[in-house]
Structure formats: structure tokens, C-alpha cells
Amino acid sequence: MRIFKPSLLKVQSLILLVFLIGMLSCEKSNNNNPEEPTSMMEEMSIPQDFDFKTTRDVTINISVLDNSGSPMVFIPIEVYKSKVNSSGLEIGDDVLVFKGFTDVQGNINSEISLATSIESLKIKTNYLGLINESIVPINGDQLAYSLGGLNNTKSTGQSNNINQGYYYTLGNWNGLGVPNYLVTPGDNITQDFLDDINASLPEALPLPVSHPMYFQSTTEYAIH
């Protein structure tokens, strides 16, 4: 009996033919039942004026003045944002977002990027003679703040001379705690004078570290 043995080429051709027929059948079946693509974004109703941005650029304008209204130069200023939880309560330490010094006009002008959810910033300085920390609101994309300067704010209804057996005052005072019985006009506290104080008694630094010579046995303590 003669046995038929197909060649390898014929076997490969037959396998390829069966594979192609199967692929064509699958494609035809898929075309008969096309699936319409759907998109969740297309089904959402979004207002035309909706802003997808999560950050914004905020312009910072800070001026620093002495008590006569003159600009204070090279004053260190730090700007912080607060860490808050989902309830809006502050948690942890503040985060530094800007640090700089005032120019010859006593100004700091800069621009920083902030989350749109931030509505205020903390302005801090370690310069003696100025308010150490203030919380300043952001209006739109602007933060404007004046530190120091003339202040004639008065308040009424404060007690006059007080004597409770522990202390005695010479008169009343305004809402900032400044006595109303001081000589008017007051002394002009210049930046040169404040610079000397800050150099001699730096804020937030222990004197044994910043000025160890103050505590040497040879130091003269008398004030002339």
C-alpha cells in the first residue's frame, strides 16, 4: 500500500488558511454588533465659566515703614501658608512660601503660585520694633500689607488711673496698649536706632550664642 505523506510546506499553508478564516469570522461578528463608546465626561453638565485650575498666581506687595512713615530698608520678611485639615483647622507647622528683604523704598514686590483654596497668608519678621506676625487676607490675586508706619488709632472706654494694691498707672491707653499720656509728638525711632538694637539683641537667638562677650568677666556693665 502506498502511504501519502504531505509536505511540510503544504501543512504550513493549510494552518495559515485556517487561521485567516478564523480571523475574518471574528471581525465579521464584531461588525454585526458594534458597541457605542460612552464617556462619563460627555454626560456631565459643566458650567461654561467653571475654572478647572487648582492653583493661581498671587502678587505680593509689602511695605515696611518706621514710626515717622519713612521706608525701612533691608528688613527680612517671610511669608507662610498654614497647614489645615479637611475641617479648615490649622495642623502642624506653617509652610514657608516666600522669603525676601525690603528694597530702598521699603517695599517687597513678588509673585508666588498658591492653591486656589488658600485665602490668607502669614507675614512674619524677626526684626525688633515691628509686629512679629500678622495674618493678611488675599483679595482676588493680590496681597497688600503695610507693616509699621504712623498709627493714630484711638479707643474709648478704657479705665483711667488704676490702683488695686499691685500696680498704678499714670493714665489710660488706646486699643493698641499705647498710653494716651505720652508726650506729643513722640520721638522719631529711626531705623538706624532699631538696627543697633537688633544687632545687639537679635530676636530668637540666645545671647550666650550670639554675643558671648556680654558674659565675660572683663565686660563692663556700667551704663554711661
Image (cartoon, helix red, strand yellow):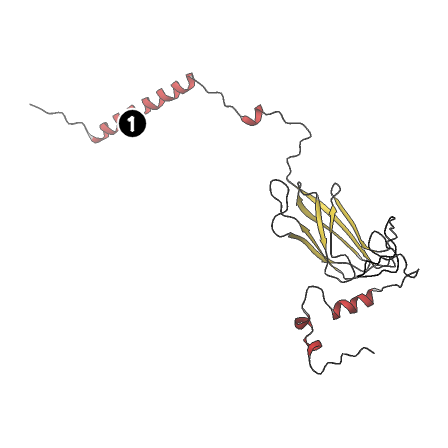
Quick one: 175 or 103, which is closer to the camera?
175
Quick one: 39 or 64, which is closer to the camera?
64
Q: Classify residue 119 by image quadrant.
A: top right
Which residue is depicted at the point 57% across and 25% down?
42
Residue 146 in the image, given as x and y percentages of width and height: 80, 52
Image-based side of 93 in relation to 174, left or right: left
132 versus 117 height, above or below: below
Residue 73 in the image, given as x and y percentages of width and height: 79, 61
Image-based side of 87 in relation to 169, left or right: left
191 versus 97 height, above or below: below
Which residue ends up furthest to the left in the rendered image? Answer: 1
Q: Classify residue 194 by image quadrant.
A: bottom right
Q: Quadrant of the N terminus?
A: top left
Quick one: 72 or 212, which is closer to the camera?
212
Quick one: 186 or 158, which is closer to the camera?
158
Which residue ends up furthest to the front in the rendered image? Answer: 165
Are there few (<14), some (14-19), or many (20+) residues within 10 Å of tag 1? few
Q: Classify residue 207 by image quadrant.
A: bottom right
Label 1: element kind: helix
Amino acid residing under circle 1:
Leu
Which residue is depicted at the point 71% across and 76% down?
214
| Residue position for label 1 | 16
Which residue is depicted at the point 75% across and 45% down?
142
Residue 196 in the image, given as x and y percentages of width and height: 79, 69
